């Protein structure tokens, strides 16, 4: 690396600039974002789950909240609407926050609320895969393939571009 134009120091020609933040687009940027987020939510009372690093739990008296982080999307579920508003207000002090209201769809999973809880469905996700494979007009079969195939690593013709197949599998 060279000294940037306009900042050349003839007394220290080998010195370069030290950037004290992460650059977006680098592998370290995601880790820096996660650390900043995790540090902030721990300061407001959330505890990181031992089973899943992207899950944060808040428990104070009768108030409970679960916060799930995926890249830069957050799912927040809580015991009261006042707690939801309080958490969103605190998050908006540190981050750009947009409240999209009740959860309906996230990462290929449709969410429907019922009195007894939530119904999660991946129907649309499965339909999108079938559409991408060009099989939307195909009829279903109880056994879609031969149950006793004779497979061999050397038989058959390889795909020209296996990318589509891999994305479907």
Image: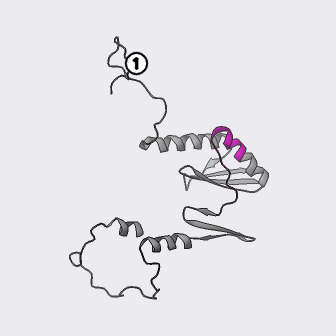
Is 82 displayed left or right of 125 in the figure?
A: right
Q: Residue at x 36, y 20 (%)?
A: 15
Q: Residue at x 45, y 37 (%)?
A: 23
Is 72 displayed left or right of 160 in the figure?
A: right
120 versus 136 height, above or below: above
Q: Residue at x 42, y 44 (%)?
A: 27
Q: Nearer the viewer, residue 84 or 128?
A: 128
Quadrant holding the N terminus: top left
- Quickly name the residue at label 1: 6
Quadrant holding the C terminus: bottom left
Q: Is residue 60 visible?
A: no
Q: Is residue 123 visible?
A: yes
Residue 93, quarter of picture: top right
Q: Residue at x 41, y 69 (%)?
A: 168
Dot 1 surroundings within 10 Å: few (below 14), some, or many (20 or more)?
A: few
Q: Which residues are magenta?
A: 88-103
Under circle 1, the secondary element is loop
132 versus 78 height, above or below: below
Residue 10: horizontal and vertical position, in percent?
A: 34, 12
Is 148 displayed left or right of 68 in the figure?
A: left
Q: Residue furthest top?
A: 11
Residue 121: horizontal and vertical position, in percent?
A: 59, 71
Q: Is residue 49 magenta?
A: no
Residue 109: horizontal and vertical position, in percent?
A: 57, 66
Q: Is residue 101 magenta?
A: yes
Residue 12, quarter of picture: top left
152 versus 67 height, above or below: below
Residue 82: horizontal and vertical position, in percent?
A: 79, 51
Is 133 displayed left or right of 81 in the figure?
A: left
């Amino acid at each position: 690396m060279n000294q940037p134009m306009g900042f050349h120091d003839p007394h220290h020609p080998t010195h370069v600039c030290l950037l004290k933040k992460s650059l977006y687009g680098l592998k370290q940027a995601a880790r820096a974002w996660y650390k900043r987020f995790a540090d902030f939510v721990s300061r407001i009372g959330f505890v990181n789950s031992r089973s899943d690093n992207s899950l944060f739990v808040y428990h104070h008296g009768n108030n409970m909240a679960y916060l799930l982080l995926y890249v830069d999307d957050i799912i927040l579920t809580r015991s009261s609407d006042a707690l939801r508003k309080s958490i969103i207000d605190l998050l908006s002090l540190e981050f750009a926050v947009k409240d999209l209201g009740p959860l309906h769809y996230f990462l290929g999973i449709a969410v429907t609320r019922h009195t007894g809880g939530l119904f999660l469905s991946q129907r649309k996700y499965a339909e999108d895969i079938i559409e991408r494979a060009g099989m939307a007009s195909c009829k279903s079969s109880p056994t879609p393939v031969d149950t006793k195939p004779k497979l061999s690593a050397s038989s058959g013709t390889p795909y020209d571009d296996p990318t589509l197949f891999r994305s479907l599998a």
